[in-house]
Image (spheres, helix red, strand yellow):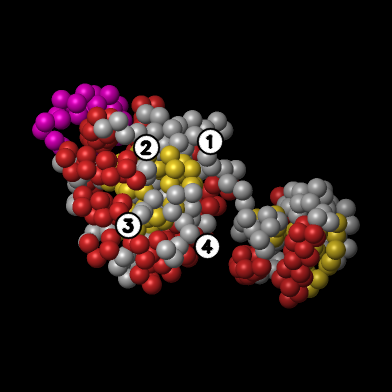
Amino acid sequence: MTRKMTRQIQVGNVRIGGDAPVSIQSMTSGYTHDVDACVTEIHKLANAGADIVRVAVPEKKDTAVLPEILSQVSVPIVADVHFHFKRALESIEAGVHKIRLNPGNIGDTEQVNAVIDACKDAGIPIRIGVNEGSVVERKDKQKRQEELASFFSDRKQGHLLAMMIAKIEEYLDIFAARDFHDICLSAKLMDARLVIDIYEELSKRFDYPLHLGVTHAGPRETGSIRSISALGSLLSQGIGDTIRISYASDPVYEVEDGVELLNCLDLRDRIGAELIACPSCGRIQVDLFTLVDDVRKQLQDDIDVPIKVAVMGCVVNGPGEAEGADVAVFAGDRRGIIYVQGERVANVPENEILDRLLHECKNLQERVRSGATKLGEKAVTIVAPTSDVTIEGHHQ
């Protein structure tokens, strides 16, 4: 894919836009004024792979503790400001790395100007973040909204998209008048198709970096599908410079799934093992799903080099589907044959598969660390066996 080149902004030590890697953001779910809990949550998000973390500052007691929080964390912190511009000014003075403003609830030009000037003096950017739930039709901007609505007339809920674009343009006029362009844009909705539509349009109209997201996407079980369908489509078109996957759940899951999305699209270097496994199938002759879950948990804890591991439940399609894996097991008849970098190393009973597979993964990790071998050089390439093969012999 070819990414659209956008302006570049700096958020702490993280670059957004231009040729910078797509970054992952999340937001703390607790009270910011509870310093210990907030710091603990920021560390968890950073350890999971978050590049930037946003905190809510609805009250002065939240901005008052920002210096204490900033002194204890290593990732850039964004202050999420709604309704009261003074919280933005206090956050800037405290030393945050970026401000998020919502045009839907801070619309007074003089107040916005005060925030812009403070950010300019501090050398930090602003995200103009519009959500569908906070935009309202404005009579004084009705003509522009009608023009945009006509442009979006062939699209689902085009009037809503028009209001959101008009709100962003209205805000950008204020920023342009102050000659401030250290800006990131976002326009989040719940409907995945609308998210794709509006970001495609933003990408055509502006060269500011775009923060992608689906708002109030729901719990992880359904929100993951809603979010990935929109963000994956946009990123595949080269649209998007930073992302947040949003769940009504532990935000660590947001980061984990965001990392995996970028890994799958080759937009982020994988850290740790990649696990592939068979789907459900009537040919499986071991407790595959328990095995896969156990392998996943152990790899997450013990492996920090990008080993590709395949866990296959039979010898019919497994060998072909595991091609390219560094370590693979093909299970059947309550046994498992294990390959490492294309060479068969073990044939073990079902109750020994997990331990032996992890043993081989750890050994390979140590050889990679020492420079004795490289991943992918001798990855598994096996021709599927004929129908008379037995798992014990596994001749080809």
Q: Which mark is residue 19?
A: 1
Which amino acid lies under the numbered mark 1 shown in the image of this protein? Asp
Q: Is residue 76 left or right of residue 35?
A: right
Spatial separation of the CA atoms under disc 1 and disc 4: 24 Å
Which tag is nearer the camera, tag 2 or tag 3? 3
> What segment carries the magenta color?
137-160
Question: As displayed, is residue 198 above or below residue 104?
Answer: above
Give the mark nearest the N terminus, 2 or 3.
Answer: 3
Spatial separation of the CA atoms under disc 4 and disc 3: 24 Å
Which amino acid lies under the numbered mark 2 shown in the image of this protein? Asp
Give the mark nearest the N terminus, 4 or 2.
Answer: 4
Q: Which mark is residue 182?
A: 2
Which amino acid lies under the numbered mark 3 shown in the image of this protein? Ala
Instruction: Report which residue position mark 3 lands on.
Output: 94
Give the mark nearest the N terminus, 1 or 3.
Answer: 1
Instruction: Report which residue position mark 4 lands on.
Output: 47
Is there CB contact under 8 Å for labels 1 and 3?
A: no
Give the mark nearest the N terminus, 2 or 1.
Answer: 1
- Residue density around tag 2, few if under 14, some if 14–19, many if 20 or more, within 10 Å: many
Is there CB contact under 8 Å for labels 4 and 2?
A: no
Which tag is nearer the camera, tag 2 or tag 1? 2
Pick whichever, 21 or 323, lies toward us: 21
Spatial separation of the CA atoms under disc 2 and disc 3: 19 Å
The kind of secondary structure element at disc 4 is helix
